[in-house]
């Protein structure tokens, strides 16, 4: 096979400053690896952190980027069933810097493949697995939410936030979402949030949550903000609450008030889906649940789809934090 185009970066920095569309060659496939001809790939906040050297996975320069795509298997390495060739698949993000999928071809371990649901377009399929797995392992795999629970979802217009709203509603839980942008309220509500609170500095968020839950409080918090924001909702926790902090959008250190947490027998989880997908039995259970819900009509919210030549500019949309849902790149 000849060379192909892929996004790479040769120095650390913001994606729009350091990414380039490079032409590179195919490396030999290793044991357990597959090569995919990519039809679409997704941009994630994790990619922004990765190019800056601030993600859990640290790049080795020059580095490819991206972990979420949909495409067709065109070759397999040793210890991989040759019957996979020709199959449409998606990739499951995992904690490793050696693989990147944002390009015309991608190489990934077979262990981190998921189905390309037949009812989804390439862009929908590429958008599905990171957001739904991120929400599933926290809300269902660990917290086991259900009817009678209230879930707090800050920064709810992100793809993971919208996925969490969808999954919580499918489990019968009540959803309180927050956003800093009044312009996003109607869209978040349309996805399924029962209540959308516009938050700002100085708001008494805990009092507003208690009012909306009839004094009961929230049993689960799915928080990508962290930092000082955590203190704003601690007094609105239900007993035995679970707080999943999976991001640091605040930019500040997260300090925990142990006394206030103990009052509600609350547990704080420093959370990443990467800590769950590495367990095959957990990953298989999550994929089966999500695949069944997709067959029943679950669909990811897509903000923007751009062609590959505009992929670097698509990161400007990610940087703006104005998007609602996932940003995708399609490859003709």
Image (cartoon, rainbow, N blue to C red):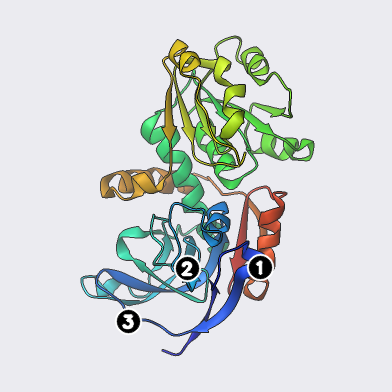
Q: Say whether disc 3 or disc 1 marks the residue closer to the N-terminus.
A: 1
Q: Say whether disc 1 or disc 2 marks the residue closer to the N-terminus.
A: 1
Residue at the spot of label 1 = 17
Between marks 1 and 2 in the image, the one whose residue lies nearer the viewer: 1
The residue nearer to you, when weighing 19 against 328, is: 19
Q: Is residue 18 above or below residue 148?
A: below
Give SS at disc 2. loop
Quadrant (top left, top right, bottom left, bottom right) of the N terminus: bottom left
Give SS at disc 3. loop
| Residue at 37%, 81% in the rendered image | 27
Q: Is residue 33 above or below residue 251?
A: below
Residue at the spot of label 2 = 101
Between marks 3 and 1 in the image, the one whose residue lies nearer the viewer: 1
Q: Are marks 3 and 2 in contact (CB under 8 Å)?
A: no
Quadrant (top left, top right, bottom left, bottom right) of the C terminus: bottom right
Relative image position of residue 289 (x, y in whole percent): 39, 43
Counting labels gives: 3
Give SS at disc 1. helix
| Residue at 51%, 32% in the rendered image | 168
Relative image position of residue 169 (x, y in whole percent): 54, 31
Relative image position of residue 108 (x, y in whole percent): 37, 67
Residue at the spot of label 3 = 28
Q: Residues within 10 Å of mark 2 (few under 14, many from 20)?
A: many
Relative image position of residue 298 (x, y in whole percent): 53, 45
| Residue at 41%, 45% in the rendered image | 273
Q: Say whether disc 3 or disc 2 marks the residue closer to the N-terminus.
A: 3
Q: Is residue 13 left or right of residue 265?
A: right
């Amino acid at each position: 096979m000849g060379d192909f185009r892929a996004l790479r970066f040769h120095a650390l920095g913001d994606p729009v400053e350091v990414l380039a569309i490079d032409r590179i060659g195919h490396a030999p496939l290793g044991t357990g690896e597959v090569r995919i001809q990519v039809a679409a790939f997704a941009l994630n906040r994790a990619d922004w952190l990765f190019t800056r050297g601030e993600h859990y996975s640290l790049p080795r320069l020059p580095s490819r980027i991206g972990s979420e795509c949909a495409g067709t298997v065109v070759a397999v390495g040793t210890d991989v069933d040759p019957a996979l060739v020709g199959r449409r698949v998606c990739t499951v993000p995992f904690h490793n810097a050696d693989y990147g999928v944002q390009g015309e071809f991608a190489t990934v371990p077979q262990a981190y493949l998921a189905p390309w649901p037949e009812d989804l377009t390439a862009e929908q399929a590429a958008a599905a697995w990171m957001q739904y797995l991120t929400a599933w392992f926290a809300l269902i795999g660990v917290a086991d939410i259900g009817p009678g629970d209230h879930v707090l979802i800050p920064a709810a217009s992100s793809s993971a936030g919208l996925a969490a709203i969808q999954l919580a509603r499918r489990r019968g839980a009540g959803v309180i979402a927050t956003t800093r942008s009044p312009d996003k309220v109607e869209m978040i509500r349309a996805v399924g949030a029962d209540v959308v609170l516009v938050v700002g500095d100085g708001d008494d968020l805990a009092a507003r949550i208690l009012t909306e839950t009839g004094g009961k409080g929230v049993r689960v918090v799915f928080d990508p903000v962290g930092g000082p924001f955590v203190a704003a909702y601690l007094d609105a926790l239900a007993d035995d609450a679970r707080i999943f902090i999976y991001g640091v959008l605040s930019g500040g250190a997260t300090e925990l008030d142990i006394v206030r947490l103990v009052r509600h027998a609350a547990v704080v989880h420093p959370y990443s889906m990467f800590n769950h997908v590495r367990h095959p039995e957990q990953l298989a259970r999550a994929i089966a649940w999500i695949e069944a819900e997709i067959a029943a009509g679950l669909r990811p919210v897509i903000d923007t789809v751009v062609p590959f030549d505009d992929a670097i500019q698509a990161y400007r949309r990610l940087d703006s934090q104005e998007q609602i849902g996932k940003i995708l790149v399609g490859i003709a």
